Image: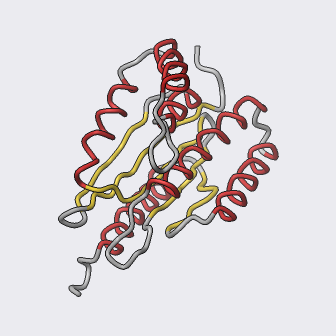
Amino acid sequence: MLIGNSVVEKCNARYQKIFGDYNINADGKILVSHFGEFSQDLVNSLTSNIEEMMLEAGDKKGVVKRMFSVLVEGLQNIRIHGEKDDNGQQVSFLIVLRDEESYKITFGNLVKTENIQGILDRIDRLNGMETPEVKELYMETLSNGIMSNKGGAGLGFITMSLKSKNRIDYINEDVSDDLVFLSQIIMIDRIKKD
C-alpha cells in the first residue's frame, strides 16, 4: 500500500480538512466530531447527547426536533447506504458545528462511483425547489415510493432538505476507481430569518 493513497487515508484527509477549516475559520464551536463507523448504539448516543447540548444552549424545541430529524436521516443514510472500502470498513464521519445563528451538520461517506451522479442530481433537484415543492415531493414519495432492497424509498435527502429549511451543499472526491467520498453540509437556523 502506498502511504497517503488508501481510501481511508484520503477520506480522513477530507475529514481533517473540514474539521480544521471549522476550527480556524468558524466563529462557532464543534460540538461533535467522529470519523469511523457508526453503530446503531453510537447513532443513538450521538443524537441524544446533541439534543441535550441544544436544550442546555437554550435552543427552541422546534430547532431541536429539526436537528434530530436531520441527524437521524443523515446517520441512517450512512449506516444503511454507505459503501465499504476494500477492507470492509464503512468509512464515514460526522461534524456538528454551532455558532450564534445556526448549526452546521457535515456528513461524509463512501458512495459507489456508478451511483454518485444520481445522488448529486437528486440533491441538486431538491436545492432548486421551494419548501412547498419539497413538501409535495415528500408526500408523493411517501405514498408512491418504492422501497429499495436496503429499506429506503428515497426519503432521506428529501427529509433533510425539508427539516433543515436550507439547501444541501456537498463536496465529492474520487478516492478509488470505484468509490467517491461524498460530504454533505446542511445548515439549521437557530433563529428565524426574516
Displayed quadrant of residue 2: bottom left
104 to 136, vertically: above or below: below
Tell me residue 143's x, y (percent).
54, 22
Q: As rendered, which of 37 and 150 lies closer to the eye?
A: 150
At x 65%, y 61%, the residue is: 40
**69 lies left or right of 167:** right
The answer to which quarter of the image holds residue 167 is top left
**Residue occupying the point 25% across, 85% down:** 3
Q: Position of residue 64 (x, y in %)?
A: 72, 37
Task: Report x, y in % for residue 71.
Answer: 60, 46
Give the total of numbered labels: 0
Depth check, front residue: 86 or 28: 86
Q: Nearer the viewer, residue 41 or 192?
A: 41
User: What color scheme is it?
Assistant: secondary structure
Q: Is residue 167 above or below residue 110?
A: above
Which of the 4 quarters of the picture holds residue 20? bottom left
Q: Is residue 115 left or right of residue 55?
A: left
Q: Residue at x 35, y 66 (%)?
A: 11
x, y (%) of residue 192?
A: 64, 21
Foreground pick, 128 / 113: 113
Q: In the image, is 3 to the left or to the right of 15?
A: left
Quadrant of the snapshot with the N terminus = bottom left
What quarter of the picture does the C terminus occupy? top right
